[in-house]
Amino acid sequence: MEALLHPHFPFDPSLAAGVSPAYWVGPRHLAGDDGRLYDAVADSLSGMGWTSLAVTRGRREPDELPKEHQVLRSTVLHLSRDALRWAQWVLADEPFHLGGLPVAWQVSARADATSPLAEWSAYFTPGVPGETIADFLAALDACGRPTAETADRDAVLKAATTHGWFRDADEPQAGAMHPTFTGRLGFAEVPSLIQDGDPCALLVEADDPGARGWQAWAQAREGAPYLWAASFSASVPHGLVAAFATSLSSTTPVRRRVLPESTRDRLLRAPAA
């Protein structure tokens, strides 16, 4: 789904009001997050009945005026109704990086609400389509046991290949990619700092390969900087990753006002009413 497009469209009245025109665009993995990744995901969580809590940490000096109070870190926590799953907006919380990009959303789950520790976590940088994260969270919200496995590893690849992606020729059982080679899914060694509740993931020797989990990313071209990255720890159920892969590879256009500069000429677009 790739084309160089004519830049001129009929006059849009929204332009007169200073509002950027909206387009239906694809492919989805190159469409970016429309500059509203928090709102897109938070609105979806609110619609599912999750509650939100703003957590701010700072430092107050003696005799400091309120307006001089230093906020060091801040995060917004969204919690499911059963308290077994949560999502954190951590972009303002000194996040670590994936592929050179800061993590924006961290999603976690546990089997027991009395446990303070997550059994798995997933991480998404800016640029991941908000619709795809929302679909992943909808699947997480709908499952009865968020840490139980519901599918095998091949379900993730089938979810992508159903929509025209093809399997990696070198690792057909562990990878898939968009026909333009701009989007990829792979079952590979998990990057450092990815949190997982499996104790085996913590017992890897320095020279041994680490735990493996699903990774996804997009690039405008081979060797270019990452447009976005997503990482799923080793214990994330394959069925949930398959929901992410289904949404990521979907050929259904997404609505955008903000088009990524690096992929504008690779997006198929049409004016949105």
Image: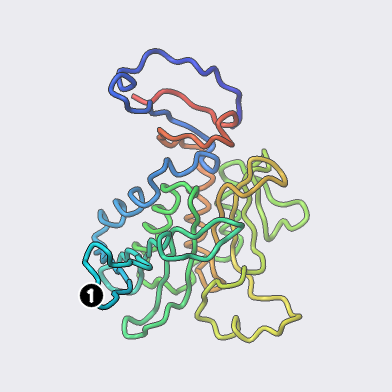
Residue count near mark 1 (Cα–Cα under 10 Å), binned few <14, some 14–19, many ≥20: few
Residue type for callout 1: Asp
255 relative position to 198: left or right: left
Closest to the observer: 261 or 46? 261
Identify whether 183 is placed above or below 198.
Answer: above
Residue at 44% x, 74% y: name it.
147
Which quadrant of the view contains residue 267?
top right
* Residue at the outermost top position: 10
Quadrant of the image containing the N terminus: top right
128 relative position to 192: left or right: left
Identify whether 28 is placed above or below 150.
Answer: above
Q: Position of residue 177 (x, y in %)?
A: 65, 48
Residue matched to label 1: 63
Helix, strand or loop at mark 1: loop
Closest to the observer: 69 or 75? 69
Closest to the observer: 113 or 125? 125
Q: Position of residue 219 (x, y in %)?
A: 63, 45
Coloured how? rainbow
Q: Position of residue 233 (x, y in %)?
A: 54, 70
Residue at 37% x, 13% y: name it.
11
Identify whether 261 is placed above or below 152.
Answer: above
* Residue at the outermost front position: 63
Residue at 32% x, 67% y: name it.
70
Q: Position of residue 115 (x, y in %)?
A: 36, 85
Residue at 50% x, 80% y: name it.
197
Quadrant of the image containing the C terminus: top left
116 relative position to 260: left or right: left
> Count of labels shown?
1
Identify whether 255 is placed above or below 193.
Answer: above
